[in-house]
Image: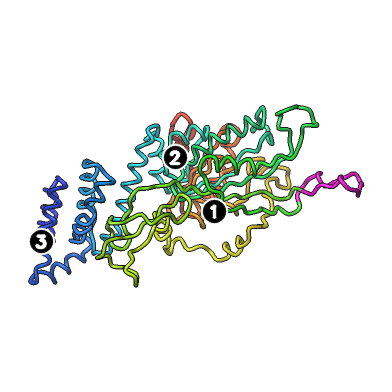
Amino acid sequence: MEQERLTKKEADLKDSEQYYLWLTAKDNESRSPDTAPAAEEKSRATDVLHPYLHKIFEVSDKYLKRVFDEELLNEFRTNCFRDIRGDRNSTIEQFVKAYYDFAKREHQKQYTDADSDLNQAIFSAPHAPKALWGSCLDFLRRMDSESVQLMVTSPPYYNARDYSQWETLDDYLDDMSCIIKECYRVLDNHRPFIFNVGDIFDNDNRYTKSSWGKRRIPLGAYFTMIFEEHGFQFVDDFIWDKGEVQTQRHKNGNRPYPLYQYPVNCYEHIFVFYKHRLDETLYPCPVCGCLKVNGNAYSGMGIKSWECKNLDCFERSAGNRGKRFSARTQLMTGLQQADNHIDEDLLRQWRRDVVKIPPVIKINSKGENILGHTAPFPKEIPEYAVQVFTGINESVLDPFAGSFTTTIESFRQRRNSIGIELNRTMFRDAVLTRISNTLGMRPKEVEREWVFIEGNSWK
């Protein structure tokens, strides 16, 4: 009966200020010597509001007013009093998560070109792989900011295939730059972009279209400059050792003399770029949940750190220093769950930054392309990236999906998997067959014109 009265009373309190005053009274009541044991027992129940939530707001009040205007603060406070239940530790955990989520939504509102229908289609059904057909730049421009936790891709190489042709290398790099700039906005903060690319031998068409204009083009170097230009930080470069590959480059016409020699091009880059957008937003102490914090310089480029100044915090150093943390450390701590444990064999395979992975076999004994794509990349790359850089149920995007290897592997790892591919006519049938054969299900498809195709209504 008491729980029924409590629920009814809470339902009557629509205004956040009423919540606050009512909770204060309940808090004072719980501190009475006669009622303290009973109150403590009740507060441990998972369906009861704990008095410590009042304490968080009391200590954090002036700091919350720095972050949110009055309207937003009332909305946030109302949401917390309505939704947060459990013992003290659970209350702190829920409050911290609610605060991060609320702050993120406010950041996302700053971008006004997002398409709500598209984002609903992409993120509301995490238990189905997504195949988005159309220009990745068009799709990216309609996605919410910082909505994807990992990107893994290999771009179309400059003029290396019939479906990836540009007039000049500069045109190609300009197009890639526009896409990478938008990827930076869509990628969540303190998250990585895993980018596989190799150098090519071709004519950049800057000065001549003649055969003498052909040269080795260092795409890896050009892309590194583009990523850094748009705010990404270069972190690692795994060298993908492809073993013995088919090439004529090392053949020298039986001239074992100086200046005739060239090595076999048998490697590609697997770059790790991180997004660390400098976020000056105050964040709550993960120990006590309060926003009574001071800036504690930076723990890295674009990573603001904080120190708890709440003297009643449950964790103080021997020198009476408060908990030091950042949004990134909070993120990393949250991923330390049993479901996210990384396979030791996988870590051993990628222990060094030179990794041996054989090229993908795409042609069978009958001369048929069994993957339906002329340039697939190995599943080992997304398999590693998904386990090492994301947690269960987080979103993984491949903006150049091709044969949808990233989409398939991330779905296998229980992530919300999203692939975008421009060449629908060329690859769709093969991709749908591959996903069906591999995962035993059909993907959720999204057309460029935002037509959603599900179940048996494929077009």
The residues tagged by marks 1 and 3 sit, at their Cα atoms, a distance apart of: 50 Å
Q: Amino acid at mark 1?
A: Ala
Write down the residue under mark 1.
Answer: 385
Left or right, 289 with reference to 457 = left
Label placed on residue 151: none
Magenta stretch, main secondary structure, is loop
* Range of magenta residues: 245-264
The image position of residue 25, as x and y in percent, is 10, 58
In the picture of the structure, the residue carrying the numbered disc 3 is: 2
Q: How many marks?
A: 3
The reply, left or right, for residue 253 in relation to residue 427 is right
Question: Residue 11 placed where, x, y %?
Answer: 14, 49
Instruction: Look at label 3 and name its amino acid.
Output: Glu
Element under disc 2: loop
- Give the residue displayed 67% in from the left and 55% down from the top: 357
Q: Amino acid at mark 2?
A: Gly
Say few, some or many: other residues with alpha carbon within 10 Å of mark 3 (under 14 / 14 to 19 / 20 or more).
few
The residue beneath circle 2 is 455
Mark 3 or mark 2: which is in front?
3
